[in-house]
Image (spheres, rainbow, N blue to C red):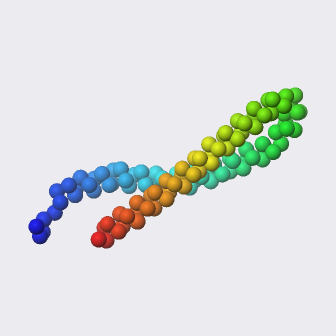
Amino acid sequence: ARGRTWRGWPQTLQVFHTQVVLSSKAVLQHCPAASTMLADLDAKVAAQADSIWDTAKNAGKTAKDVKQAQATITRNRACIAQARTSGAQSLKTVDSSYQKIKAALLW
């Protein structure tokens, strides 16, 4: 058995380079910027949400309209928070995978 190599090794490396590396690069490249953009967007939405009553009153909207707008804002902010959480989890997954791959290569 000494000196024998696993025949699937080239295919494994090919999958690694075409799927794992490319996916990891995309996560590392896009997630931090997207998270920052989403945080900025959430801050802007929160600032505008604080003045929704005044804005609605000046536009002649009813209390029902304002409540519907507030519900929409709350749902949208929840989507933003979920997207940020997803991005952070993706970054953790890439880091964890990197650590496992590094350990496997050193083994």
**Furthest-left residue in this view:** 1
Please indicate whether residue 10 sits to the left or right of residue 46 in the image.
left
Q: Which residue is drawn at 39% across and 52% down?
A: 22
**Residue 93: x percent and y percent?**
46, 57
Residue 94, x across and y down, in percent: 45, 58
Q: Is residue 17 left or right of residue 60?
A: left
Is residue 53 at least partly visible in the picture? yes
Numbered label tally: 0
Foreground pick, 74 / 32: 74
Residue drawn at the location 40% of the way across and 60% of the way down:
97
Determine if residue 29 is in view.
no
Instruction: Locate residue 80 relative to residue 68 in the image: left or right.
Output: left
**Picture quadrant of residue 52:** top right
Residue at horizontal 29 percent and vertical 71 percent from the top: 107
Q: In the image shown, does 55 or 78 lie closer to the viewer?
A: 78
Q: Quadrant of the N terminus?
A: bottom left
